């Protein structure tokens, strides 16, 4: 399963003086779902547009399924399914016509397109609306048509720019499981500004800031390598901070207000046991005890927000 | 792939009220014109009978009708071509074509042939009017065919220019107005052909009208034919180049 589906080398794109994307490199293997995170304007969409061949890079190379996107665009694009931020739909066509057209554009024969449209409409929950005009659909359904269009021709690489934007929570969950399923036997690159979404779907995560790739790691590593080192507690009648600091393993205490505290402790030395015993002996009224996972959110905030606050 | 894109473009036109409205308005204006011309011809008929080598229906009805039709086409084609790229760039629908495994040439030619197919239908409907006279009069089919060919070539050239200008801007209205300006300027350019010397000849040669007039007289000059083909090819290749460059500029 180590087949390289997409490879990006030193990709750079400028808008005037601004380097929107600055020498980023990464690879995508079959079976990976790669999540791009970053604040608005970090260069996520620009990267996606370049990957889809809609925007030309100023420097660097993109290989899709072994073909150079700049030198052999037609061969490279054959292996590509793209959903831009705004789904590219013709408002005057019906869902069925739109999907059929897209399938034909990607080289499917007339009969193959017809079968693919029926199959994908069912998979994306579009069967009921297949005869309705695109312009009469809600944003959520239009987004689904966009996703259906990106997977219709069974591409090896899918590039999805914010795939669940505008969907209600239930639809978003369906689309997420669809993407996870599709990602098992191909490569998916998606961008999102929802951390929980990336955590839920992706196998790998990359964080961009000001056009640069500042963090890249498999998600599994993130969960294993960074064990919990924080404990959030709530006490009805809290003792003095000094008393809490005496608990074994506690290195630092943050007061969060309303009887809540965050205890920082050494990895693997969570003071649960001692805390519960003391609380019960001295009637602190313990009502919350939560270990805080080093989440993607913490990493995201450390990488994205803190440098900006220093400036 | 070109036919897939062209078919969608043509379908898209008929799914919007614009195409139907244009067809109706053009038919309405030209039908009225046609009736007036037939009426004039009926009054003149008696006097014409006494002349040797008298002008026939093709000269007195078809040619003037086609002359007006050319004007009407020049005014309407910008409204058809303005949407080709401007609107799709604005709504983002163009991303579908740009990320699909098709070349820029296929995209441009597909859209061009889609619009051209519509215009040829319009030309066919216009040509039906003088052709209907064949029921009761002797028609000079050669002259009539030359006129139809001239009108088709004019439509091909004008829509190529309109397509190019719609690649340049994301505002359909701007594309329409610049196309209209360019076409009218090229149409009337031969007014400057009275300027002595090379300049006058050049203006005369570049004029759309100069080349169209020959067809109305029933003359088929391959120079005129090639002029229209070159005119269309030039604007189409400019459009392909520009579309390719857009990916660098956007």
Image (cartoon, coloured by chain):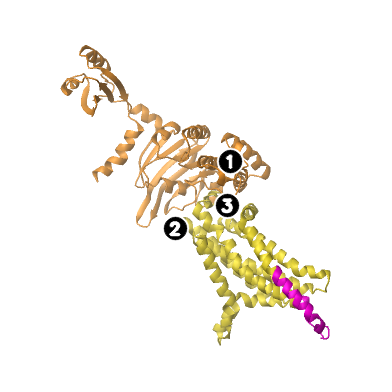
Residue B34, percent across and down? Answer: 72, 71
Chain letter for yellow, please.
B
Q: Which chain corresponds to the colour orange?
A: A
The number of numbered discs placed on residues in the rendered structure image is 3
Subunit ID for the residue under disc 3:
B
Q: Is residue B248 above or below residue B68?
A: above
Q: Write the start and end of the magenta stretch as one range.
A: B31-57
Label number found at residue A152: 1
Among the 4 quarters of the image, the one containing residue B107: bottom right
Q: Is residue A45 above or below residue B130?
A: above
| Circle 2 residue | B249
B56 drawn magenta: yes
Q: Are marks 2 and 3 in contact (CB under 8 Å)?
A: no
Q: Pointer 1 indicates a residue of which chain?
A: A
Q: Residue at x 48, y 58 (%)?
A: B246
Neighbours of disc 1 within 10 Å: few (<14), some (14-19), many (20+): many
The stretch drawn in magenta includes residue A280: no
Asked if one can make out residue B223 in the rendered structure from this viewpoint, the answer is no
Q: Which is more toward the observer, B54 or A148?
A: B54
Residue at the image position 25 percent from the left and 17 percent from the top: A285
Chain under disc 2? B
Q: Is residue A142 above or below residue A258?
A: below
Residue drawn at x 23%, y 28% as measured from the top left: A257
Are the residues tagged 2 and 1 within 8 Å (C-beta)? Answer: no
Q: Is residue B126 left or right of residue B2?
A: right
Q: Residues within 10 Å of mark 2 (few under 14, many from 20)?
A: few
Q: Secondary structure at mark 2?
A: helix
Q: CA distance from mark 2 to mark 1?
A: 30 Å
Q: Is residue A39 left or right of residue B199?
A: left
Q: Which residue is mark 3?
A: B102
Alpha carbon separation for disc pair 2 and 3? 20 Å
Could you tell me residue B148's position as x and y percent? 71, 69
């Amino acid at each position: 399963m180590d087949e390289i589906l997409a490879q990006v080398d030193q990709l750079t794109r400028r808008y005037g003086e601004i380097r929107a994307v600055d020498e980023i490199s990464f690879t995508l293997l079959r079976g990976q779902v790669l999540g791009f995170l970053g604040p608005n304007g970090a260069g996520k969409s620009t990267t996606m547009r370049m990957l889809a061949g809609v925007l030309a890079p100023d420097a660097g190379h993109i290989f899709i399924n072994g073909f150079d996107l700049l030198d052999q665009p037609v061969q490279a694009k054959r292996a590509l399914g793209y959903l831009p931020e705004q789904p590219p739909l013709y408002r005057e066509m019906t869902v069925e016509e739109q999907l059929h057209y897209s399938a034909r554009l990607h080289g499917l024969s007339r009969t193959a397109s017809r079968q693919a449209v029926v199959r994908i409409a069912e998979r994306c929950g579009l069967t009921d609306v297949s005869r309705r005009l695109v312009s009469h659909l809600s944003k959520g359904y239009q987004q689904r048509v966009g996703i259906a269009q990106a997977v219709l021709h069974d591409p090896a690489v899918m590039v999805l720019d914010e795939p669940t934007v505008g969907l209600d929570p239930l639809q978003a969950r369906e689309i997420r499981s669809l993407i996870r399923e599709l990602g098992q036997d191909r490569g998916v690159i998606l961008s999102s500004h929802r951390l929980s979404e990336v955590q839920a779907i992706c196998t790998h995560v990359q964080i961009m800031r000001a056009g640069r790739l500042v963090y890249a790691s498999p998600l599994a590593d993130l969960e294993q390598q960074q064990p919990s080192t924080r404990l959030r507690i709530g006490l009805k009648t809290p003792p003095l901070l000094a008393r809490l600091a005496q608990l074994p393993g506690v290195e630092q205490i943050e007061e969060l207000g309303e009887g809540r505290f965050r205890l920082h402790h050494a990895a693997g030395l969570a003071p649960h046991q001692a805390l519960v015993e003391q609380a019960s002996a001295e009637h602190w009224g313990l009502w919350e005890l939560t270990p805080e996972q080093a989440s993607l959110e913490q990493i995201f905030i450390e990488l994205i927000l803190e440098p900006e606050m220093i400036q | 792939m070109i036919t897939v894109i062209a078919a969608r473009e043509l379908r898209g036109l008929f799914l919007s009220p614009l195409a139907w409205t244009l067809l109706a308005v053009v038919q309405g204006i030209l039908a009225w014109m046609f009736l007036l011309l037939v009426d004039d011809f009926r009054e003149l008929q008696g006097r014409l009978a006494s002349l040797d080598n008298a002008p026939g229906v093709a000269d007195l009805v078809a040619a003037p009708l086609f002359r007006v039709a050319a004007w009407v086409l020049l005014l309407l084609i910008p409204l058809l071509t303005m949407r080709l790229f401007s609107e799709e760039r604005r709504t983002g629908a163009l991303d579908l074509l740009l990320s699909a495994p098709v070349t820029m040439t296929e995209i441009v030619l597909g859209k061009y042939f889609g619009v051209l197919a519509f215009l040829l239908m319009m030309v066919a409907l216009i040509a039906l009017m003088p052709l209907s006279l064949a029921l009761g009069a002797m028609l000079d089919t050669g002259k009539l065919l030359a006129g139809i060919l001239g009108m088709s070539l004019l439509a091909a050239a004008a829509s190529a220019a309109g397509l190019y200008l719609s690649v340049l801007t994301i505002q359909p209205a701007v594309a329409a107005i610049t196309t209209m300006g360019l076409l009218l300027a090229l149409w009337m350019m031969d007014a400057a052909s009275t300027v002595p010397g090379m300049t006058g000849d050049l203006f005369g040669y570049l004029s759309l009208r100069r080349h169209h007039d020959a067809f109305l007289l029933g003359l088929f000059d391959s120079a005129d034919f090639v002029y229209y083909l070159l005119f269309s090819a030039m604007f189409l290749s400019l459009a392909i180049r520009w579309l390719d460059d857009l990916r660098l500029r956007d």
